[in-house]
Structures are given as structure tokens and as C-alpha cells.
Image: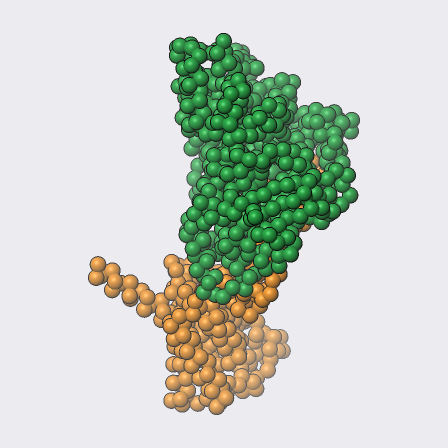
Chain colours: A green, B orange
Amino acid sequence: MAFIEIKNLSFLYPGAEKAALNGINLTVEEGEFVLIAGASGCGKSTLLRRLKPVISAYGAVEGGVFIGGEPVEALSFRRQSAEIGFVMQDPEMQIATDKVWHELAFGLESLGIDQRTMRVRVAEMASFFGIQELFNMPVNKLSGGQKQLVCLASVMVMQPKLLLLDEPTSQLDPIAAADFFDTLKRINSELGTTIIITEHRVESLFPIVDKFVFMDGGSVRYCGEPRACAPLLGKDERLKKVLPTAMTVFYATNGGQNNNAAPLTVREGREYVKTLVANSKPAESAYDKKAAKPRRKAVKQRGEKPVVSMRDCWYRYDRAGEDILKGVSLDIYAGELVCIVGGNGTGKTTCIMTASGMYKPYRGKVVLDGKPISKYGDGELFGKRVGVLMQNPILSFVKDSVREELIYTAKTHGVDKSRVDEVAAEMEIETILDSNPYDISGGELQRAAIAKLLIFAPPVIFLDEATKGMDVFFKSKFGALLRGLAERGTAIVLVSHDIEFCAEYADRLMMFFDGGVIADGLPEATLLGNNFYTTVAARISNGIVDGAITASALIDSLSGERI
Amino acid sequence: MRDAFDNVNPVVAFVFFVFALLMPMLLLHPVMLGISLFCAVVWLFFIKGRGAFMYLVKFVIPITILTAILNPVFNHAGVTILFYIRDNPVTRESIIYGAASAVMLASVVTWFACFNHIFTSDKTVYLLGRFAPGLSLILSMSLRFVPLFTAQAKRIALAQRGAGMGTGGGNIIARAKSGLSIISSLITWSLESSVTTADSMRARGYGLHPRRSFANYRFDKRDALIGSALTLGIVATGLAAYLKLISVRYFPSIKLNEASPLFLAFCAVYALTLLIPVTMNLSEALKWRSLRSKI
């Protein structure tokens, strides 16, 4: 008998018409590492929470979940707490206490374990996670990635048999996420803990999981080895977006052969592309430049004046502190989508805060529409000429529904109410206008927050980490909306960790490092030379096919080769 | 620099502070007050270095002077009249009593400064955890939530400013409106996020009985040693007060106990007890010096 058996499980939220889960059947063996993917709202979180009854939602349940042969509801609270660990999305709010040591000890304190055992368990987990040096730190001094590791460790101290994780890296940057996945892999292989995780970032998880489950509309569409998910997902135009780049390229070019041997990693992808290129044509023709498609908008047309221009800007938070910006100069032109990428703490966010006039540089100047930005008053700048969206879109909402928020914004800026419906249509949020901002998904929230800025139609919009926590389906819609906005003349500056997204949609890409712009140009130009800080497609094609930084560009040039 | 007393088990440290803070108020004996103030000031110098000087000049000395002056002005008890201010007698007893209470206040305030430095939130959480685990957890959670709340308030204000709806522009009514809406959204946020926190706590077994607090501090031999020295000091003080070895009367006329050898011995015990932290600092400094000279 399998360790976990989910038998014909259906679930209906109170008051809902459509079932959140629809006859789910799933088995998980002991020690397995399972990935559940699917669009936001597909029921994966609901399913995960059914495995831990103390935190699952109320509603009508059919069928059942069995762990080790017992119905999970029959497990006592004590056993559930110790044996089934649960890590949630937001590291900030999961942490209950003020110090790392206290957070690690929390679960053991609840179980009332004796002092000596508590000490040993906390110590060994701190060492296993490599967070000993954080042990006495206050939690609010940690980075997001460190916080999430503490959350994971605080669950692992109870030595659970089953570890459930609900989109644990959606709030983390790619490096911290990779670190987190590495830790999960170690937990699985070194401690033998069974892991079930829901995630958007399948790219980095595909190579390390044993089983891949794809959910859509409350039911399981695929369940099996990650490598073999092709026949189902590869063909569906909508669903195939979830696949890793190597697999996407594979299915588009393999002509339906060897479907079960799809490449998962960059290395496997490179091998596949190499054989493809070698089999089809002489090697030289593979280095055709045609893959570098001309961009939608030629960057920096001659004679055009920038909307925003930053010259030698230096910024630090306090006098004794370190410089965050070290002489940044950049120009933003009307109607372009500029993406700023770069590692954590390199000053990207500070850069747009300075460019938008939120922060004042202590040296250098920012010019907006030919006038120094410091000459504008707050009232003339924000809400008229510039719109800034912070990293967390929920911060933009002070009213109880999206509609109220937009009306309130229109009123504040003296704009006619009819504008609300216009921007709602533009950002495609008509269906969620009457929802509470806390009840809608991250992707919808981001669009609603942009709609709020569009009320007063600023010529420049600054967005910080706008794609964070968005699933792939939302992301492509979001990208298209941003492009539309840019084509209608708005300059958009987007700070992001999401290189894939930037490569796909940006007119221009800037790379930020150590408080300055180190590369600035077409996405192809900025990303192609890089080995590490670039897209997966570029890493797969580097040196084999030239100029492909997105999966679609790579597919185009590969299919071109084969003719 | 880390103070030597920092590593003492919080229960012992707490008893020490209670003793140091209560005795000046209970005894009010001029000699005891002097000893107490002296010990507190010396320790403060060990803790804060030069900062202690600023603290004394800016804070302790002004309130001391103020108390010393105000008491004889308002308190006219006592038999030895020195002179009159607007027909009100100023007595020698009230001047001396004023000086004594000024020193008492100064020593209590200085002890508090030391307490604030030594007694971190971790120690309070530990101490409460011994006796009231639930309360200790609430304290720890508030310590987590308060900075989170202020940071979120700042972020919301910044986000609103970015949409031209901050408190920085427009007339007073618009600003007030914007400020109120920020507060209301802050409350919504804290309610929403507390749901997540509650889930995460519940997922880790919060609510099971009995709850036991994790002890971040141990009770070692040195703690036992300091604890017994402290107990000795406390018992000696109790005995001295009970046997009337120390007694003081300020009104109507001043009367002190005799300076018997036993009294002097007690003074030494009292001083040594209050000097425990200073002694520890000194011996630690000596140890380090000898360690360094060996290298």
C-alpha cells in the first residue's frame, strides 16, 4: 500500500458553484519527491491543504485522504503537527516570533518536548540548514530567502515524515529559490522525507523531482515522470507554457519522435540541439544571424528626447552608510519597455526610486521632460507625470474593493469616473472589479494596481518586481498588456529578476551591478554574451545557434535549419 | 563591548536587579544610598564607557539637583529651622531628606540604565517562559509584530505616494484623508496576515498542552556561585534591618543608628553584593590581560 493515497477526492468551498477539486486520485510512495503544478486557482493549494486537516478549509468533501493507511482526519492534532510539516508562500507572515532561535524551537515548544531533546533537535537542524550564524538574530534582519529557510527549518525540527510546501519560493529571487530547492533536494535524499510541493518554477524542479502532477480546473491532467509529460502537455497551446525551455524546444522540433526522452536540463538541451543541428545541415549555416529578430521599436531614435534622464546619480540611505547608486546615468524614451535586471542588493529598486523622484540623489540629477525632477512638487509629479508601483501590489490598495479603489483614485486626481471602466478594460480586470484586493491572485492584483496608475495616465510608469509570484499563464498575458501600453506611448521601466520575461517582452534591457548600469541595449545584445546571467534558451543555444534568447526564437531558427 | 554580567542566567540577573532597585527605596539610609549610587555609576561606566558620562550629565544630575532643591521648598517638617522663604520655614531635616531622596532617585535611575542594557528581550522571554509560557510567547510575538507593523506603514505610505495619493501633497483635508486611508489599510493588512500567522502556528502544533519554553540560557556553576553570593547579601540585609543594625529617621529630627562594627561589616557586605557585576568585569579584564601576555 502506498504511503499517501488520495481516493476520489472532491471538494466544494461553501457558497461556490464549481468544485475546487474534482475526483482526485493520487498515490505517493514513501520518500517520493512530488511536484504539483498548474495555473493559479487550479486547486493545487486546496489539495495540499487537504493533506493537513488542521489548516484545511471548511467545505463539502467527498472521497478521502489516507496516510499510512489511516484516514488523515483520524490523526490526532499532536501527530499531525509532528508528522506533517507545512510551509507556506509568504515567509514574512509565517514567522510568529521575534528571534530565529525561538522560531526554530516553536514547534518543539508546542509539543512540550523536554529541554535536552529540544536543544539537540534545534542544533542539528540549524547545522543541517547552515543557519547557525543566524541563530541569535532578530527575524526582521534576515533576507527573504533566509526567512523562508528558517520557516522550513522550523518545520523540519519536528522530524516530519511528510513535508508539504505551497509555492514556497514565489516571493524569492531566483538565486534564493535555487538555494531553497537545493535544501529540499538534500532533505529528500539525505533524510528520506516525502515531499509534495506546488510551484510555478518547474524549470529548476523538473530535474530533481520523481513525480510531476499537473492540475487544471480542479482535476489532475497528468501524473507521472516529468520527462514523459509530453504527449499531454506539449500539444496543448495553453498548457505547454508550463514546460521547461529545453522541453518546449524539444517538442516543437522533434517531429513527434522519442517523446519520452525529452531533455530537462540545460546540458541535456544543449546535447539535443547539437545533434539536431549536426543532423540537418552543415555547421556554418547554423550560425545564421537571422534569429536576432528586429525589435518592435528601434531603440533611441535619432533626435528623440528622453522622457526621463538620469545623470551621474549617487544615492545612499544615510550619511554614514554605503553608496547604493554609484554614478548611474540612463535615459528612458517614450513608448519603450525598459527592463532592469541584476542580482539582489545591486541597487535596482533604489535606481527606479531615484529616477521617479521618490528618492533624492545626493549628487547628480534627474531630468523629467526637460526640467529637473527636484523642481516639481510632489503633487505635480506623482499622480500626474510619474506613476510608481512598489514590489508588493497589495500596498496600493486602501479600499475594500478594486472598483472603490479606482474610483477613489479618480476622485483624488480629479478624473472623471468613466475612466475607471476604461482602465479596467485596458488591463482586463472587469471581472474582479468588485472583489476584495486580498481575495484575488497575485497576477490580477498586479494588473489592478497598474490600472490604478493608469487612471491618471502618467507618461512614465515604474514597476518594481511586477512579475513576482505570477504563474506562466498570467505572465504572458501581463507581458502582452505591458507591450500594448508601451505601444500606445507610455514609457515603462520594469525592475525584475525574471530574465526570461524581460528577454521576451523588453525593448531594451539594462543590467545592474554594484550600483551602476553595466550593460544597456537590445535584450539580445545584453544577454547573448553572458554565460550565467542570461536566459535558459541562450544557455542552451550558446555557441550552437546564434542569437536565440527565447525558446520561440530558438525554435524558429532550428526549424529554419531543418528545411 | 560585551559586559561580563551579560552571560549570567536571567533568573539570577533578575533577582540582582530587583535587589539593587528596591533596596535604596526601602532602606533610605544615607550610607546605603551612597554605596548604591557608587556601585551603579561604576558599573554604568563599565557598560557604556564614555557614554555613561553623557548619561549622567544629561539625565541623572539634573533630576538629582531638581529633587534636592524642590524638597526643602515644599516640605517644612523638621525641628531645626534655618531660615524663612516668604514666611515658610526651611529646615535642616528637609534639606538632608531632599538630598537623600535625590541620591535615591539617581541610583535607581542609574540601575535602570544598567538593567536596560543587560536585560534584553530574549532574557525577558526566557524569564517569562519559566513561569508563564503563554505570556512569554505573546511578548515574543509582539516584539516581532511591532517592527513589522511600522515597516508596513512606511511601505504603504510610499506606495500611496507613488500613485500621487500620499500625505505629502494637497490641502490639509486631502492629507488627513490619505493618512486615514493608510491606517485603515494597515489594519486590514494586519488582520489578513494574522490569518496566515495563525495557520502557520497551528500547523506547528500551537495549542497542544502542555507547552514548554525553549531555554536559551543555562544555569551553570558560576550562576550558582553568583546566586548564593546574592542570597547571602539579601539575607544579610534582611537581618540587618530586622535587628535594627541599620535604621534612619529624618523627621522630626534626624536619628541614625550607631556606627557599630557589625554595622560596618554589613555595609561591606551590601557593597560587595552590589559590586558583583563590577567584580566580574574586573576579573574578566584581568584574565584577558594575563591571557594576552602569555601569547
Q: In this view, does B21 lie above or below A306?
A: below
Specify the quadrant that holds the C terminus of chain B.
Answer: bottom left
Seen in the image, is B157 located left or right of residue A14?
Answer: left
Indicate the position of residue A101 as horizontal and vertical percent values: 48, 56
Q: In this view, does A554 lie above or below A438?
A: above
Q: How many labels does the image show?
A: 0
Q: Which residue lies furthest to the front in this view?
A: A1
Q: Quadrant of residue A305?
A: top right
Q: Residue at x 48, y 81 (%)?
A: B29
Indicate the position of residue A266 as horizontal and vertical percent values: 44, 27
Indicate the position of residue A133 as horizontal and vertical percent values: 41, 51
Q: Is residue A278 above or below residue B11?
A: above
Indicate the position of residue A81 as horizontal and vertical percent values: 58, 56
- The one nearer the camera, A175 or A230, is A230
Q: Is residue A31 above or below residue B57?
A: above
- The one nearer the camera, A132 or B235, is A132
Specify the quadrant that holds the N terminus of chain B.
Answer: bottom left
Q: Is residue B138 visible?
A: no
Seen in the image, is A250 located left or right of residue B134?
Answer: left
- The one nearer the camera, A353 or A498, is A498
